[in-house]
Amino acid sequence: MKFENTEVFNFVGALRGMRLPLQSGAKADSHYCTPNECIMCPRSSGKDTNNPFHWEPCCGEDISWTPYRIGNNDMDLAQRLVKASNPHDKFLRQVLVSMDITASLAWWKQMDQYRVGVVTDSQSTMHTLSKFPITMNNFETCDYNGSLLVYDREPYKENFTVDDIWEEIINHCETLRQRYNETKDIRYWKELIRLLPESYLQTRTWTGNYSILRNIIRQRSGHKMVEWQIFINHCKQMPYAKELLFYKGE
């Protein structure tokens, strides 16, 4: 599983709208960093620090820094609304998130349950599956155990493992791919699609918001599919994750 091009934006609009119901805009105290503040930040690269419409990671995989600072007054109100839950925390729907996620089809099938306010644009299996050799690198292996013993008694082959099964699966899929490219007979392509394991990796550009991420964190923590914990760990690196995404009302 892989995450690339993560962006988080529109804290400004979300917090401005948060104060509209009680017309308490005079109490707002959030602000953009000044250039000097950004230069002083030990994690700042100085990139795009004056651009209010773009947030960019500044320190390798660390995506915890943002040029917009939420003030104490605004954070206090935001956390009270988050603690009150739906519909009071609806300002979280306006904190937008976009990222490229490479994950298995099995994980995407579960992720597709979170559809409200979500847009995805995906790599096309139909158009790209036949273009490249099929190897183990095309499949999700984050908790793979190839040495797991499947059969250890007669009449089966002794020490038959998960690795043996995958070798056969990949050989069959690659054979069908090659036959389709040689003959252009759509039947080979259809059987390849039919046999393709759900662990096949697909990249999608996913756009959602903090409200959806908060629901995912609450509902998928401890899930037996290890990809969900990997996803949640990625969320921990987002701006104000501890204060908003993972806040439990302490």
Image (spheres, helix red, strand yellow):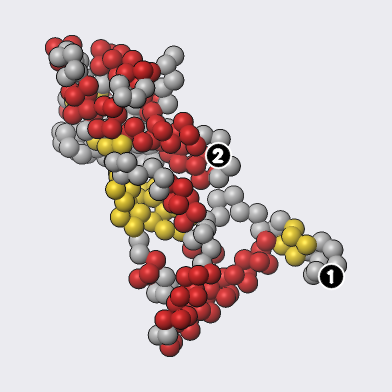
Residue 101 sits above or below residue 74 on the image: below
The structure residue drawn at horizontal position 85% and vertical position 67%, both measured from the top left corner, is 154
* Dot 1 amino acid type: Pro
Q: Is residue 25 left or right of residue 73?
A: left
- Quadrant (top left/top right/bottom left/bottom right) for the C terminus: top left
Q: Which residue is mark 2?
A: 223
Residue 174 screen position, x and y as percent: 52, 75
**Structural crowding at the residue carrying mark 2, measured as other residues with C-alpha within 10 Å and reported as few (<14), some (14–19) or many (≥20):** few
Visible residue check, residue 106: yes
Q: Are marks 1 and 2 in contact (CB under 8 Å)?
A: no
Q: Residues within 10 Å of mark 1 (few under 14, many from 20)?
A: few
Mark drawn on residue 53: none
> With respect to residue 193, does 51 lie above or below?
above
* Along the viewing direction, whichever of 212 and 1 lies nearer the viewer: 212
Residue lying at the far bottom in this picture: please name it. 183
What is the quadrant of residue 58 in the picture?
A: top left
Task: Measure the alpha-carbon separation of dots 1 and 2.
Answer: 36 Å
Q: Name the residue: 45% across, 52% down.
A: 109
Disc 2, SS: loop
Q: In the figure, residue 86 lies in which quadrant?
A: top left
Does residue 181 appear in the picture of this structure? no
Q: Position of residue 143 (x, y in %)?
A: 59, 49
Q: Which of disc 2 and disc 1 is earlier in sequence?
A: 1
**Amino acid type, mark 2:** His
Percent across and percent down for residue 249 are 42, 16
Residue 231 appears at what percent x and percent y? 45, 41
SS type, badge 1: loop
* Residue 56 relative to residue 23: left or right: right
| Residue position marked by numbered label 1 in the rendering | 155
Left or right, residue 164 beside residue 229 = right
